[in-house]
Structure formats: C-alpha cells, structure tokens
Image: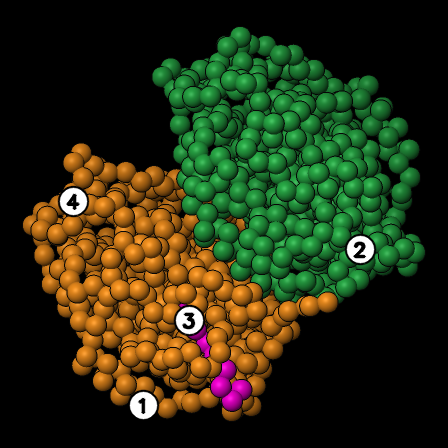
Chain colours: A orange, B green
Amino acid sequence: MAAPSQPDLATRVALSARDGRATAPVLAWLAERAAVTWTRAERIPLEDMAGWVTEPGTGNLRHHTGRFFSVESLTVSLPGAPVPAWTQPIINQPEIGILGILVREVDGTLQCLMQAKDEPGNPSGIQLSPTVQATRSNYTRVHHGRPIPYLDHFRDVSPHEVLVDIRQSEQGAWFYRKRNRNMVVEVDADVPVLDGFRWLTLGEISALMSVPDLVNMDARTVLACLPGGGAALAAAADDDFSAALVRSADPTAASAHWIGDVLSWITEVRTRTELRAALGSLADCPDWTRADGRIVHRDGGFFSVVGASVEAVGREVGTWCQPMLEPVGVGVIGFLVRDIGGVLHVLAHARIEPGYADTAELAPTVQCVPETYDRLPVRPRFLDEVLTSPRLRFDTVLSEEGGRFLGARNRYLIVETDAEVSPDDPEYRWLTVAQFEELLRHSFYVNIQARTLLLCLRSLIPRG
Amino acid sequence: MAAPSQPDLATRVALSARDGRATAPVLAWLAERAAVTWTRAERIPLEDMAGWVTEPGTGNLRHHTGRFFSVESLTVSLPGAPVPAWTQPIINQPEIGILGILVREVDGTLQCLMQAKDEPGNPSGIQLSPTVQATRSNYTRVHHGRPIPYLDHFRDVSPHEVLVDIRQSEQGAWFYRKRNRNMVVEVDADVPVLDGFRWLTLGEISALMSVPDLVNMDARTVLACLPGGGAALAAAADDDFSAALVRSADPTAASAHWIGDVLSWITEVRTRTELRAALGSLADCPDWTRADGRIVHRDGGFFSVVGASVEAVGREVGTWCQPMLEPVGVGVIGFLVRDIGGVLHVLAHARIEPGYADTAELAPTVQCVPETYDRLPVRPRFLDEVLTSPRLRFDTVLSEEGGRFLGARNRYLIVETDAEVSPDDPEYRWLTVAQFEELLRHSFYVNIQARTLLLCLRSLIPRG
C-alpha cells in the first residue's frame, strides 16, 4: 500500500537550519531591492480616503465595494477580569487568506523562496516576507491588479507536496477572528525565481531573526509552524543553556507536564472564561472619539485608527487609500525560560483576547505595552523580571503586519529565570519546545506572538 | 524531575475492555432501577409550557429566567451547496456543560461509574449514562434542585487524575454551537456508590453497545474520547476483518494518508467553505409554521418543535415543562470500512453543519434521514451501499440526547466495502482508528455521530 509520510521532515529542517549563517549577501540583496521597490504611506484624514466610506448611522469604515475589511466596534464582557467590560474599535476581516512559503531541496538542503516586500505600515521599508501573502480579495482579484506570483502552487496542491497547512489566528486585540492559512509547499528545484524573490536556507533566515524589523510577521508565523527540526543534527552544546534547549526540542525528553495535562488546562481556561464579544457601531464606542480625521482613545492610549494614502512602486497596484491601526508605544513580548531537570521549559500564559476564534490561546509569558498599564489597575505578572533580568538570551525589535498596522513594533525577549510557578497555576504552565510544536500542528492553540518567540528561541539551537 | 504521564493508559483501557462481557447482570440492574426511577413526558402545546415564554416580536422560545436554552431561527448561506440557503429553527444553548465519567482501578482493571438515568425524550426509558451530565445551569443551581452527585470530582481536579478533558461539539443541525466538556477522571477505589450508579468495566459497556437504545449519547461521546486501548492486548484474530481492525487501532500501522495530509484536507475544507449562519427570529422562518401548539416544516419534513410536560421520579426536580425537538424518521449513520494493505480504514466524510463551531467536522461516511432526501435534489453518496451491503459488521439503533430531543433514533451501521475513493476526493478520506483517536485529543475534529460509530467499531476488537 501507499503510506505517504514525512518521517524525515525534522531531519530535513535541521539540515537546512545548519546551512549558511552569513547574513551579508542577503542584506545586500535586500538593499538592492529597496532601491527598485518601495511603498510610501502618507497620513490623511479618514474622511479623505478614496474608495472608503463612513457608513451612515454606524460610523463604521468600509470599502465602497463592501470587501477587503472594515473597522467596526467590539463590545466585550469578561466577568471577573481587572477590566470586566469595554468597547473598542476593531478590524473585521472575516476572509481566510493564504500565507505561503514554497520550499525546494537542492543538494539535500531545503531552501525557502522568500520575497523582499514593503508594506505601507513597515517602520523601515522592505522586509523578508513569505512567497505569497494573499487575502481572499487579493486572489479573487478585487484589486483588479496583476496576478499574484506563485499563488497557484498553494491553491491546487498534491498531498505529498504539503509540509504545513494550518489556519492560525492573528492579533486578537486588533482583529476580530482573523485567521490565515499558513502553508509550506514543496516544489521541484526548477521553479523560476522572479525579481524580488530569493531562495534562502532556514539557517540564513534564522540568522536574520536578530536583525531589527527584518523578518516580517507573516514569514515568522509560517516558519514557526514548520516543525523546528527537533534535536536532530543539533551540535554538541558547550553550555548548559544550549544543552537544555536542544533537549527541549526533542519530543522524547521529559517535560514538567504531560501533554494531556496541558490540553486539560487549556480546556479548563476556555470553559471557565465567560467571554462575550459583539461587533457593533463605531459611533457607539464611548471612550473613543473621531476628531481631526482619526479615531483616538479619550486619553490617547492603546492605538488610533488613521487614514493612509499609499503609493507603491513594484507592487500590483500603484496607489490606494486605506485605514490603518497605529499602536501607541513599543510592546514588550517575552518568554521566561527555565532549565527543569536539564530540559529548557518556556512559561506559557493562557491569554484571553476578544478577537480570538476560541477565547484563549497560549501566549508569551509577558505580552503588553508597558505604558498602557499606567492606565490600568494591574501590572502584568513577570513584566519586571523580563525587563530587568541580566540573563538575556534574545532581544530584538520586530514589527507586525504592515498591511494593516502602522509602525507596530514589539521588543521580543527571551530571558532565563529561576522563577517557581505552581504546577496548578490557573494561568501559566511550563512547556517544552517540542510540546509547542505538537500544539502547532493544530489551529488556535499558540498565539501569533508566541509563534514568533518560538522561532526566535529555535534560532538559538546550536547547529554544527 | 517530575514527569507525570499516562504512558500505560492504552494498556489499562485494553485490560478493562477485555474484562466482563456478560450483559445479563447489568440488564437486570437497569430493569430494577427502571422500577424506582422514571420520567414521563407528555406532549403539550408550546404556549402551555409553564416557565417558558414566546418572546414578543421574535417569536423565540425562552425560559422566563433567560437561562437554560432557547429556540431561535438560524439563517444559513452555503454557496455552491445543493441547497445553498435556508432558515430553520435551532436550539441555542451557549453554555459549556460537563459530561463526566469517574473511573477507578480495582485489581488492575479500570471501572467506570455509570448511571441508570431516564430522560424525557428517551424512546424506551432508562439508559446507561455517564456519572455526571450537567449543564452550567445545572451546576450553578438555576434548577434550585438537589446538588448533582459526584460533580465536585469534575470541578476541582488534580492534573494526574484527568484521563480525558476536551470540549466536543454535538448535533450541528439541531444545536447552534453546542459544546460539552467531555471528561474522564480517575478516583480512589473507595468512592461511595449511590443508588442508581454502578461500576462497569469497559468490556461490559462494550458488550452493551449492541443493545438498542441502551448506552446514551452522552456516555458514548465521553467513552469515544478515551483512547481505545489500541492493539494492546488484542486477542489473536481468527479472521481477516478482525486482524485488520486490530492493526487499525495500532498507531504504528501504515495508513493510506499521513496525518499531515488529513489535517491539510480539513484545513482546505474549512477554508474553502463560505458558510454564513446567523441567529434570528423564529417569526421570520419562511418554511416553518407555528400551528396547533407546535412548530413544523411546511411539508412535514426534518423535525418539529413541540412542548413537553415532564414528570420525573428519582430526579433532582419533580416536574417541569420544556420545548423539545422531535425529528422525523429514523436516521441512518454508517461507516464504510475497507481493508487497505491489511489495515482497516474508515471512510470519513468532511461534513458541514451550520451549528458547528468550526464549519466542518469529520463525520460518518453516511449520515442522513433517508425520507428527507425525497424532498431534496440529491441522494447521499454511499447511502445505498450502506443500506444494502451484505457485509454488515454492526447494526444497532441508538438514541440521541433525551434531554433535548424527543424520540431521536439513528440506525448505526458498520459495513465492509471494496469501494474505491480517489485519494484527493474533496469530501472523503480513508482514516485508521488510530488516526481518529489522535484527532479526538483535540476539539471539533470528529463529530458526535462519528464518535459513536468509532466506539461501536472498537467494540468489535477481539479481546482475549
């Protein structure tokens, strides 16, 4: 019988991860691309956005075609939480898009076809992006633009070519139930490489993770879903941290909790949380006002909704307008990690966000914008430890989706700790890297910030 | 380090599954219980139900407290389907209840604490039920009834006691996003046994699966989530079917598709399906009319919504009224199974139901009420093969949740086939029993009818 399988995927990923750590050629190529393709976004009043209307009555922002996305309000009730009820603006984009990376194998090494791509909200221009980022509006051609290169490879696939194919959520504080299909598809080595695309090994991308604002959010989420290569082909570790990290990526290593306990804890959180979230009218958003062509919180916190007029060179459509969400401040997103019995564990937080498809997802230990907490009655657990610990293993500012967010940046941190957390803490559990990877085969367990940090953590695995 | 795990659970389940196949003592006990505890439901007009109101304007049926559940309408759009749009009555019960079975180990054998329980909609009285069936209204005591026995064992659990803890969906054609928490919790052997409860081995329950209308739906769904014991301790099979079935339950056996391909197919179905489902007013349900105290479809098909006046002896509350959904006809629910390379495979169908939390779930090969298809433009694929094949392995009528449905019965069938199905058929895939069990660790992959059939199929595994 045919029994197709991918038993060797972990090894193939590991082989690619140890190939090529030099970043200079890639950075030179990106600089070259930046000279021929760029995006320029100018802030304009919301009422001046061509193609967009403020809906009479509701005040919601939507495209005149009714497609793409809209900005509405979300009224949230979360009994028992420090802030038990609020209303906020939110992006509603119910379509499921495709974030896809093509891979090929050359001389036994996997390579990813990455794209040098600018988005209007990127803080510093071109970023390393997946082969394809396509909303359903994109690929059903509402834009009336040029066809999307390589899209067909993701729309009509044979089973044996698919290495990753799973829907994952995005920011649940800014998007209402946004989900994208994260895909990795293997192709023959002779697929032509168009301008603006380049084959990179996982090792090359790994090394680029510590360059600020370089690997874009969409590339990070897709790569996080690719099994990390486990302990296969890890180099002999010359320090305790590296040795514990290698063991953490090994599915056979001991863990603080068996996976059934982790799943039961997630079930418990999702069952006990009585989250209610209802879309409504931006006009009925008490703490938010629309003035001077933008929507802002009454004390200037959280984020604002602004208009952008975008001019793009080297993109499918030359100019357009759109609303964007512009966050206040730079976020802090951190994993506390700890050696437990020789195996590195990550302290996962069961985080509730109103826009999640399923109430709660596993999030980083810390995920917040510190300034915001000047306005709220609580200070996030573990924030001070993440910010002040000297045992820093990773520290890079990366930016979020530049197609919807304007200059959204987070400082991603991985910090060693000796913190003790009760094994039945209602909100936190110690997980190994291998356990995260098991959960990442399924939708909506691991949030987008934790997916990025997992990728950062795996970039620290020593390879020969 | 502590590394709690349940590595031996499959073996423990298998040991219990081969213990005790004699059904007579259990049937005698159930008959005894039927003499002291019963429920009587009398049909009454919807407008005569004490405690229930028809909401002015919407026509929706709800309890005067606003709790328990309501009957509303659901407007569905499913472009491209044979019936691309319709509106129907539906039960809206957003609370997540608990379906729980306590287990203990005596002399190395797991035993389940089962309850002899009647529900108003049961076609023939008492059924074998889980230790606990509790809606959130139940356990927060909206009923003002007696406390629910054993409930505390499921509300405050230590991690090492939990064998199963996962939310699963129920009928997506009759319930709007109904989910219950399916739990199996292990306790010390000396938990007292109250009247109406009895410890049974998995082997005893297995043998009772072929008694019509005996093992209730809630017990079936919980037991299906318990790992089936795999091939551990299977007896030497003396025929090809049994041998292939034993191999199918072995996670190391070859399968027609690797699990990544199965997950990608589910992702594809959930992504391509543009299902829209919106709750609304029963008053705006074009093909349905409320007349003579009930709500019926204009040509008498599908189901009706009726009022029931219930009198219970031996239950927490003596008398109450409630609406119930009364289906038309007896459903046919069948697995086609086939030996592929010596391993039994089940033909799973990716089924879309408007009330599912996530668009589509894996369902039996066939799941329909044949009469209904006299009214619809298509005949279900494989229905005729399931109904006429001589290679019948299981054939028992079982009933669905008697707390909401009045006399809802389905004929559950397992039939051997030689049918060929294309490996990239958009709607069907061959799965092994072990693959179903892997998916059952997570929510919303396997629908409630398939969970029942999986349990029926596992009851055929020969044990020494």
- A184 is within the stretch colored magenta: no
Which chain does tag 1 point to?
Answer: A
Q: Mark 3 falls on what kind of element?
A: strand
Q: Amino acid at mark 4?
A: Val
What is the residue that sits farthest to the front in this orientation?
Answer: B377
Q: Which residue is mark 3?
A: A101
In the image, residue B302 lies at what x, y percent?
58, 25
The percent coordinates of residue B453 (x first, y second) are 72, 43
For the residue carrying disc 3, how many other residues have a C-alpha within 10 Å: few (<14), some (14-19), or many (20+)? many
Which residue bears the numbered disc 1? A25
Looking at the rendering, the stretch of residues picked out in magenta corresponds to A100-108
- Which quadrant is the N terminus of chain B positioned in? bottom right
Which residue shows up at 82% across the image and 44% down it? Answer: B391
Q: Is residue B165 left or right of residue A96?
A: right
**Within-10-Å neighbours for mark 2: few <14, some 14–19, many 20+:** many
Residue at numbered disc 4: A53
Q: Position of residue A367 (x, y in %)?
A: 36, 62
Quadrant of the image occupied by residue B364? top right
Q: Is residue A299 visible?
A: no
* Chain under disc 3: A
Dominant secondary structure (helix, strand or loop) of the stretch shown in magenta:
strand
The span from disc 1 to disc 2 (Cα, nearest Å) is 56 Å
Are labels 3 and 2 assigned to the same chain? no
Q: Does label 1 lie on the same chain as label 3?
A: yes
Q: Tell me the tag on residue B245.
A: 2
- Residue A447 higher or lower than B20, as above or below: below
Task: Tell me which amino acid carries mark 2.
Answer: Leu
The reply to whether label 1 and label 4 mark residues of one chain is: yes
Disc with the residue nearer the chain's start (3 vs 1): 1
Q: Which label sits in the foreground, 3 or 1? A: 3
Q: Could you give the CA–CA distance between mark 3 and mark 4, rounded to whole angstroms?
A: 35 Å
State yes or no: residue A105 in magenta: yes
